[in-house]
Image (tube, rainbow, N blue to C red):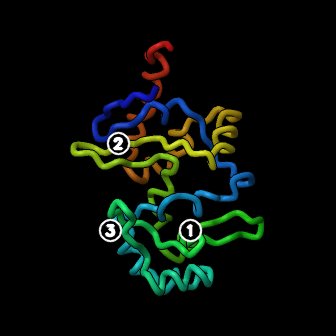
Amino acid sequence: MRTIIDLDTVQLTTDILEETFVCDLKKCKGSCCQSGEAGAPLSMEEINLLEDNMDVLLATLTNDGRAAVEEQGVFYLDVDGETVSTLIEDGTCAFAFKEKNGILGCSIERAFNEGLIAFNKPLSCHLFPIRVIAEEKKPLLMYERISICAPACSLGNELKVPVYQFLKEAIIRGFGTEVYADVEQAAEFWRNNKPST
């Protein structure tokens, strides 16, 4: 049973500290870029960055992705009224592309890595499988376990890497080094003090 730990500026579920996770792209093929009920959650800042850099990004998209973005823009509102990335007809993110090995990659991340733009893929993608739930006082970081990530759970277990350690860079990007240090302390405390089952 998951428990919520309350830190100074965020809350998090204890399965982020306990569960293991390391993306196994050879097995999952990046299916998180095409599976799901909606596109990737985008902040207004990210939407503005995407729109301001469309001249660069359009050249990196697939034909279907380019057509979708040119017709619909970089985002739409999902059933909950949240701003999410545009999808193509088969449900794949408009910013995804298939590499030679069949793995789906992110054109935003590729442009960032090539120095073409100054920002990385959306934070919601970088943090996945952690989802950030807006709460009144402070955000809640919640681990979302889904079937397509079963290979990542298995590889994480084999390598003994907890979710929070695998997502260190993303947590620091989203919340800062002090928050990550707090998460590390929470993990140590939880290991030593969690209730016995």
Residue drawn where x is 40% and y is 42% of the image: 141
Three-letter code for the amino acid on which mark 2 is drawn: Leu
Which residue is at a point 49% across and 44% down the rendered structure image? 144
Label 1: how many Cα within 10 Å (few below 14, some 14–19, many 20+)? some
Q: Which mark is residue 140?
A: 2
Residue ID for mark 3: 44
For the question of whether residue 114 can be seen, the reply is no
Please name the residue shown 49% across and 59% down the image.
Answer: 37
> Do callouts 3 and 2 mark residues in contact (Cβ within 8 Å)?
no
Q: For this view, does 74 lie left or right of residue 26?
A: left
Gap in angstroms between the C-alphas marked 2 and 1: 27 Å
Element under disc 3: helix
Q: Nearer the viewer, residue 178 or 124?
A: 124
Alpha carbons under labels 3 and 2: distance apart? 19 Å
Mark 3 vs mark 1, foreground winner is 1
Marks 2 & 1, CB-CB < 8 Å contact: no
- The residue tagged with tag 2: helix, strand or loop? strand
Q: Residue furthest top?
A: 196
Choose the circle earlier in sequence order: 3 or 1: 3
First in sequence: mark 3 vs mark 2: 3
Give the class, few, some or many, for how many residues have Cα within 10 Å of label 2's Cα (few <14, many ≥20).
Answer: many
Q: Position of residue 189 (x, y in %)?
A: 43, 22
Q: Which badge, 2 or 1, comes first in the chain's sequence?
A: 1
**Residue at the extreme front of the image, as rendered:** 79
Residue, disc 1? 91
Q: What's the residue type where badge 1 is placed?
A: Gly
